[in-house]
Image: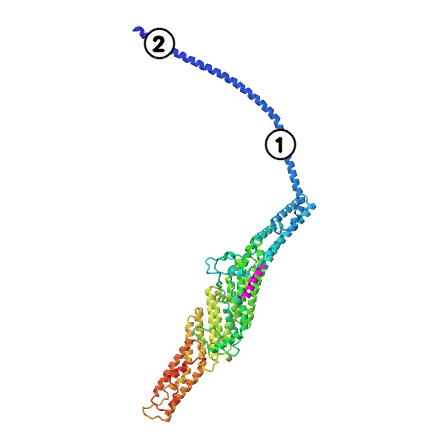
Amino acid sequence: MGVSSRMIPTEDASARKREIEEKLRQEQETLSFIRENLEKSDQLTKGMVSILSSFESRLMQLENSIIPVHKQTENLQRLQENVDKTLSCMDHVISYYHVAKDTDRIIREGPTGRLDEYLACIAKIQKAVEYFQDNNPDSPELNTVKARFEKGKELLEAEFRSLLTRYSKPVPPILILDAISLDEELEVQEDVVLEHLPEAVLQDIICIAGWLVEYGRNQDFMNVYFQIRSNQLDRSIKGLKDHFRKNSASSGILYSPAVQTKRKDTPTKKAPKRPVYIPGTIRKAQNLLKQYSQHGLDGKKGGSNLTPLEGYDHDLRVKHLSDALNEKHGAAAGKDDVLDIEIDSYIHCITAFVKLAQSEYALLAEIIPEHHQKKTFDSLIQEALDNLMLEGDNIVSAARRAIMRHDYSAVLTIFPILRHLKMNKSEFDSTLQGTAASTKNKLPTLITSMETIGAKALEEFADSIKNDPDKEYNMPKDGTVHELTSNAILFLQQLLDFHETAGAMLASQETSSSASSYTSEFNKRLLSTYICKVLGNLQLNLLSKSKVYEDSALSAIFLHNNYNYILKSLEKSELIQLVTVTQKKAESSYRELIEQQIQMYQRSWFKVTEHLADRNMPVFQPGTKLKDKERQVIKDKFKGFNDGLEELCKIQKGWAIPDKEQRDFIRQAQRRAVSDAYRAFLHRCANISFTKNPEKYNKYRPEEVEEMIERLFDTSA
């Protein structure tokens, strides 16, 4: 047991030793392998270093060989480029010497039909000029290309003029009327485009104008432009005038459907609502006022040729007078038709001028440089504007001459024109914005002239109403409406149609501080005051004229008819609304005057009905025999009544009360008054025996008396 225990440690140590030796052996083998590899690596490294050293040596040799060659090649390329550039410059320079020859044919043939090619040739010539000026200013070639350039510019200017002249045409009147008319039935208004030049031509003109501004250093083409376009603008407006003269009188249709193809599907345009005036109404007023200035119909008889108001009947005598008047003044009516056309023409030409001027400015803005546009436009519109203003001045002069002849109808010509000018003044001013002050002031000057002469005519007309002489031959024999009344009312009705214009006319002559603002209400009060003045003058004159009649009853009928006509006219035409602005009780005042004249007329029957009164009537008892003196009193009463009735009915049957309502009222009132008195008288005399021949004195039954009175104021009976 003791030996075994000592053996065990010895075996462990031996095993441990063998293990260590084994590891040592393995480490030695590994170390030997590493050494071998290191030796191999050293060999490879030495080989690589040798190769690299050899490669480096060869590269150095190559570089030393290539760099000189590269430098030589680079120098050769540079020399080649210099040669090419030199040759190119030589060709370019040489080309300048051939420009005149190369462009000769194109320049001689001009730019027509090939503007782009022509401008390219001009550009070549321009470059040649610049080259010779910079490099060889003394060379003869410079003069040659300069001359060629000037020739080319002249031909461009000629082409500019030619295109404008050839394609600028007056705008057709129908197209102008379409452009200035408004159709209220169309929901969307289409502007009629005024194409003055074809698009292709316009582009050529714009191109030429641009070149002349930039390279031509020439502004003469602007003068050419405004001269040609100015002529076309003036011709367009004159063409519109001719259109009115040729077509207005015959057809009365001045407005046409739009002529552009794109608008064929739109509704046919109707004549627009024109607020200026209705042709014919002014002529009618002028005719009557001219008749008034000639002192009555045929220079002998008085009476009224006015258009009847509602409730007025014209008897056969008035109809015959009217027919005679129409025949007598047929030629004058023809002249007045022409006047209507001229007024309408002038009004539309003013509107057309604004529309055409606006379209001309739009065209001009595409062609003329911006800083020259206002001046060129100012020159362009002068001729047409001057002609319009001259025509307006002629209208003012004609009105002034007519007023000097006491023909106040001339002012009616001014009203529609003046109203239209003032309505369009803001647009007119906007169109002329930027033009010279003298140009802008032309329309205001014309407006001022028209207002001045118009105000003068109004005042003189009021004075003429007041001072119209009381001539017996000019008084209506039947006591109807005097033509002075109808003329005055007709004149005032025209003022109603142009009340704003008339009020402004009167206000323009006011110098008081209250007139400084010229408000609409102020103008309205001025016009109301004027109308009341005319009516007051008319009333005073009528009262004076009524005294020409020897019969006070006829005088009353005359005043009644005139006052009634004035009142009915005021009410029907709404003049009463203007009158009441300053005279609140005007209507009731006229009714009182009318009632007063009715009462004055009724007094004429007192000499008839006084015979029926109880005064001097004998007192008797039934069955008592009357004395001769008493019987004679009754006979005289019957005879006085019969003679008076017959005389009045005979006289008054020839008098006239045109207003049917008033005529019936007066007849009925008089019939009732006379009939009642007559019946009462007959009743009192029913049982009195005052004659053996009662039918000799009791000639008329009450019904017959009523029928006789019913026939009063009936000239056809």
User: Is residue 598 at all visible to an observer of this figure?
Assistant: yes
Mark 1 belongs to which amino acid? Glu
| Residue 233 belongs to the span the image colors magenta | yes
| Quadrant occupied by the C terminus | bottom left
| Residue 97 belongs to the span the image colors magenta | no
In the image, the segment drawn in magenta is 232-249
The colour scheme of the drawn protein is rainbow
Give the x, y percent position of residue 110: 64, 51
Dot 1 falls on a residue whose secondary structure is: helix
C-alpha gap between disc 1 and disc 2: 91 Å
Magenta segment, prevailing SS (helix, strand or loop): helix
| Crowd class of label 2 (few under 14; some 14 to 19; many from 20; radius 10 Å) | few
Q: Residue at x 56, y 69 (%)?
A: 398
Dot 2 falls on a residue whose secondary structure is: helix
| Crowd class of label 1 (few under 14; some 14 to 19; many from 20; radius 10 Å) | few
| Quadrant occupied by the N terminus | top left
Q: Nearer the viewer, residue 491 or 450?
A: 491
The residue where tag 1 is placed is 74
Q: Residue furthest top?
A: 3
Q: Mark 1 vs mark 2: which is more N-terminal?
A: 2
Give the x, y percent position of residue 155: 64, 52
The residue where tag 2 is placed is 11
Q: Nearer the viewer, residue 585 or 150?
A: 150
Drawn side of residue 628 relative to residue 211, left or right: left
Determine whether 544 is above or below 516 in the image. Answer: below
Give the x, y percent position of residue 378: 57, 58
Give the x, y percent position of residue 30: 45, 15
Q: Residue at x 34, y 9 (%)?
A: 9
Res 367 label: none
Determine whether 716 is above or below 179 in the image. Answer: below
